[in-house]
Image (cartoon, rainbow, N blue to C red):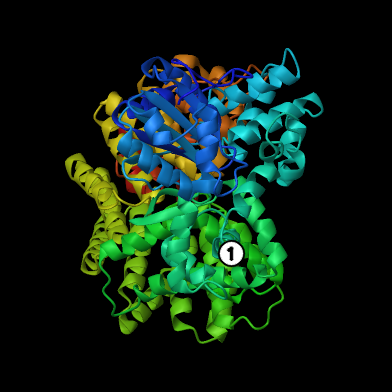
Amino acid sequence: MMLRFADFSNLPAEPNAFVGRESDLDELVHLMSVSRAVTLCGAGGIGKTRLALRLAARLMPGHPGGVCLVELADLEKGELRGHVAAALGIAGDLVETIGERRLLLLLDNCEPVVGECAELCRDLLGACPGVRVLATSREPLRVPGETVWRVPPLSVGGQESEAVRLFVARAGAAVPGFELTDETGPLVADLCQALDGLPLAVELAAAMVRVLSVGQLVERLDDRFRLLAGGARTAPARHRTLRAAVDWSYRLLTPQERLLLRRTATFRSSWTLDLVESVCSGPGLAEEEVLPRLCDLVDKSLIVLDGEIAGQARYRLLETVREYALEQLVASGEEAELRRRHLTALAGLAHRFKAGLAPGVRTSWPVIERHVNIFDGLKAEVSAACEWSVAIGVPEAALALLTDIRFLLIGSGRKLDMAERLDRLLALDAPQVPRALRGQATILRGELALAAGDFEPALRHVRAGLELCATADDVHGEAMGTIVLAQLTGELQALNRALETARSSGDLILESLAQGTRARYGLHQGRLNEARRAFQEVLSISEELDNHYGQTFGHIGLAQVARRTGDPAAARRHYESGLRLLRHVDARQHIVSCLAGLGRLALDRGDLTEARARLTEALVLSRDAGLRAGIARRLEAWAGLVAAEGDHRRAVLLVAASVALGGRQPDARTEHVLRPARDHLGEAAVGVLWAEGGRLTIDQAVACALDGDLPEPPHAPVVPVSRDSKLTTREQEIAELVARGLSNRAIADELVISPATVARHVANILSKLGFATRTQIAAWVIGGR
C-alpha cells in the first residue's frame, strides 16, 4: 500500500533566493511536458540539485499523485529500490502500488547507483503511465526515452550576468549591505569569469567577503581549492569545499578515466580528438581506448564539448576541474613527458602545414583554410608549448613550430603576443639550435616587430637573422629575410636578388611576396603603372596556388591603384572580392584593409552612412587585434569621416591621436583634416585640440571615434602645439608653382632665388606632406583649391 497522501511533496524549503536560470526553467518546464524522463547532467557544483528542486516545485500542480525527492548521494549498491519505496511510503511492490497515479519522482545524485537507477526508471516508465522522472546525475542514465539536458554554468561576462547576480546576493547575506561599486563591479565580473560561472564556486567565493576584499579574492584565485574551503556546515560534505566537490567526481571514475582526465590537464585551453589521442595515449591507455574514455568523461560532465575547430569537435576542461587534474598529473610524475608530447604534436601539425606550402606542392585552399582555423583555435596551446620550452631551456622544437607557421602569425593580424615568447626562446643559451633555424626565427621576430609598427627593432632583427642564414648557406632563409629587409628599407637591388632566388627554386610563394613588396614601393612612390603590374602578378601567382591570402593582397593593392587613378568602381570591386575570399578565416589585417578601403570609397562619394558602418567595423577589428599601427591608420580615416560630418573638434583630436600613436610626421592627409578645421575653429583652437589629441591613449582615442567620448578638460591650460605639416608661406608659394608644372629653375627665376634653395624647399614640402613625387604635390594643391 502507499502510505503517502495525494498532493504529497517532500521538497525542502529553499534556504535562500534562487538567482538566474529563468530561461532554463521555462525550457525545462516545456521539456517535462513532452518527455517522461529528463536527466539534468553537469559537473559537481554546477547547480543540478537546486535547479531540479525549483523545477519540481513549478511542476507540482500537474502531479496530483505527489512530488517526491529521493536523495541518492550516499546510497550503496543494492539499496535503491528499498530507499525509493521508503521515501514514497510504500510497503510492497513499487510498480504495482504506484499504478496509475500521476507522480513526479525526483532522483537526486544518481551517479553512485546509476545502473540501478536506469533499471528502476525503465520499469516505472514502462508499467506506470502517470509517472514522470526528473533525475540529476553527472552522467546520463541511458534509459529508453530519456532526454538528457546539460546544465550550463551561469552566464558570465558583465555585471548584469547571472553569476555576478548570484555573487552579490550571497555576499549580501554574508555582509549585509554589500553592493557593487565602480571599483568592485569589474573585479567581481572577472572573478565569476575565472570561476567558469560555477554556482558552487561563486557561492563559496561570495561567502569569503566576510574576511577578504573582492580584490584579495581575485588575487588569490590561483589557489582556488585552498581559498574556497568555507562552505556551510549544514551543506552535504561534498559541497562544503570546492575540492570536495571535484574529489567526489574523481573518486567515481574508473582507473582509465582518471588517467585520461589528469593527462588532459596538459592542454592549456582546448584540444581536438587527434591531439588528445597523440598526447594522452601511452602506458595504461592505448590510443584506441582514448575515444571511449573521452566519451565517458564527457558523459560524466568532467570534459566539456565546446563547439568545433575547423570541423573537428573541440573539448576543454572547466578551469576548476583542470586545476584539480593538473595537481593529479604533477603527483603522477608524468607531467614532463606529457608536455614533451604536447609540443611534439603541435610541432608536427605545424610541419605538415609548412610542407603543404613547399615549392612544387599545390595545396588547395580548403586544406590551407583548415590548418589556419586549427591553429587559430589552438593559439593558447602554442603559447603553452613555447612557455614550457623556455622553462626547460630547450628551444629548438618551439622555434621550429613558430617558423613553420610564420605565415599564420603574420597573416592573422591579431595581437602579436608571440613576439615576447620568441624573444625568450631566442635568448636561451642553446648551441644545439641549428644556425639556419635560429636565423629564420630571428627574421620572424623582425617581421612581428614590423607588423606592430616597431621599425628599429624590426631592422635589427632582420639583419641579424640574415647574417645567420648566410653563414648557414640557407638560401630560402636569405631570400625571405631579404624580402623583409626590402619592406623596411626599400633596397630594391636586394629584392631583385630575392626574386631571382625564388624563381630559380620554383618557390611561387616567395616570388609573390617579392612582387608584393615591389608593388607596395611602386604605389608609395607614385609609380602606379609599375605597382599595378606587380599587384597583378601577385594575383596571378596566388590564383595559380589557390592562395586566398595572396589573392586578397593582390586585390587590395589593385583597389588602391584604382582609387588613386580615379576608378572608384574598380576599387570597390577589388575590395569586395578580397572580402569574399577570406570569409571563412580570420585574416584580420587583410579584412581590415578591405573594410577600411570600402569606407574611404564611401567617404569619397559622400555616402557617410556606409562609410561609418565600414570604418566602425574596421576600427573595432583593429582594436581587438591590439596592433597600435593599425589602430592609428583607422583613426586617421575616422578623422576624415567626422570632419565630413561637420564635427571638426573631434576630427582634430582623432587625427592628432593617429599621428602620435603611429609615431609618424603629419602629412598631406593630416592637412586635409586640419585645413577645414582651421577655417571653422580658428588656428588657436586647432592648436589646443591637437595637443589634447596627441595625449590620448589608444582606448581613449578609440572611444572618441566610436562613442564620441571627448577627453576630460585638463587641469592646467593646454599649450597649443604647432603641426609640422603646415607649409610656410614660401613653401605654399613654391607648391603652387609646382602645381603649375614649373621646374626648379623656372621657379627660381619666378621668385628670384637660387635653384638650390628651390630644391631644399621642394624637399621640405615632400617631407612634410609625406609625398614622393612632384605630381603628388600638384594633386594636393589642386585638391585644396
Q: In this view, does 139 lie to the left or right of 518?
A: right
Picture quadrant where residue 531 is located: bottom left
The quadrant of the rendering that contains the C terminus is: top left
Query: Residue 562 location in percent, x, y?
Result: 23, 47
Residue 498 seen by the camera: yes
Residue where numbered disc 1 is placed: 255
Could you tell me which secondary element the residue under label 1 belongs to? helix
Q: In the rendered image of this protein, does residue 774 appear above or below residue 266? A: above
Q: Of 42 and 514, which appears nearest the observer? A: 42
Q: Residue at the location (30% across, 53% down)?
A: 557
The residue depicted at 82 percent of the width and 27 percent of the height is 211
Pick out the residue farthest to the right. 211
Crowding at label 1, few (<14), some or many (≥20) Cα neighbours within 10 Å?
few
The answer to whether 536 appears left or right of 185 in the picture is left
Please tell me which residue lies in front, 62 or 447.
62
- What is the quadrant of residue 642 in the picture? top left
Question: How far across and down, in percent of the image, does residue 51 sit?
Answer: 50, 28
Count the numbered circles shown.
Answer: 1
- Whether 718 is drawn above or below 490: the answer is above
Residue 97 picture quarter: top left
- Residue at x 65%, y 51% (from the top left corner): 323
Please, is residue 172 above or below residue 37 in the view? above
Give the residue at the far top of this rendering.
Answer: 177
**Amino acid type of disc 1?**
Pro
Q: Position of residue 45 (x, y in %)?
A: 59, 38
Q: In which quarter of the image is the N terminus?
A: top left
Depicted 674 relative to depicted 172: above or below = below
Residue drawn at (52%, 47%), measured in percent from left and top?
113
